[in-house]
Image: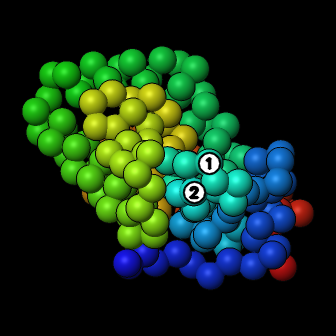
Amino acid sequence: MSRPPFAPFTDRDVDIVSAQLGRQARDVIGIAARCVCGAPTVVATSPRLGNGTPFPTLYYLSHPAATAAVSTLEAEGRMAEYTAMLLDDVELQNAYRAAHESYLGDREGILNVPEIEGYSAGGMPVRVKCLHALVGHSLAAGPGVNPIGDLALAECGWSPEVCACDADQRPA
């Protein structure tokens, strides 16, 4: 099986992600995207945790400034607005379904977990449930793969090209 090309990660990266999340990072398999300064921005987690639990969310936004910016969009009700956009736009529906398939392919390229087969993240392919997962997917996969993640990233007011990291959460 192939797996997505994650950047190599270090113990320091896992420590930074743990500090970003406010808990010990579990079953990290890669850093899927980084800030311009090199700090982890999106963590990739094993599709099956070490304790055996299936874990469908491969990509998750961990960067505090990015997370805060995306949380603001969620608090403003953008998830419902994006879902309504999906209902009205067949082209957007098709692109979002393709993002779902891409996500599934990335995860299954790492490990096939029958319990989560067909489930991606963030409400894909028919609704918008978690912008943190969708923006994480956009940052990991690159522009043009996840249209809702791309839209949220463009609207959130945060960019991986402008460092907003705390000094203690930058790579050494």
Task: Give the residue drawn at x 53%, y 28%.
Answer: 73
Task: Give the residue drawn at x 72%, y 47%.
Answer: 64
Determine which quarter of the picture holds residue 11: bottom right
Residue 53's label in the rendered image is 1
* Residue located farthest toward the left when viewing the structure as drawn: 90
Q: In this rendering, does residue 163 appear at all? A: no
Q: Which quarter of the figure is the N terminus placed in?
A: bottom left
* Disc 2 to disc 1: CB gap under 8 Å: yes
Residue 107's label in the rendered image is none
Determine which quarter of the picture holds residue 128: top left
User: In the picture shown, does residue 96 fall above or below 171?
Assistant: above
N-terminal of the pair, mark 2 or mark 1, is 2
Disc 1 crowd, CA 10 A, few/some/many (<14, 14-19, 20+) = few
Q: How many marks?
A: 2
* C-alpha distance separating marks 2 and 1: 6 Å
Q: Residue 160 location, x and y as percent?
A: 57, 59
Q: Residue 6 location, x and y as percent?
A: 52, 75
Disc 2 crowd, CA 10 A, few/some/many (<14, 14-19, 20+) = many
Q: In this rendering, does residue 92 appear at all? A: yes
Task: Give the residue drawn at x 38%, y 78%.
Answer: 2
- In the displayed structure image, the side of residue 23 where residue 45 appears, left or right: left
Label 2 secondary element? loop
What residue did someone put label 2 on?
Answer: 48
Label 1 secondary element? loop
Q: Amino acid at mark 2?
A: Arg
* Residue located farthest toward the right when viewing the structure as drawn: 168
- In the displayed structure image, the side of residue 41 where residue 101 appears, left or right: left
Q: Amino acid at mark 1?
A: Thr
Q: Toward the viewer: 31 or 39?
A: 31
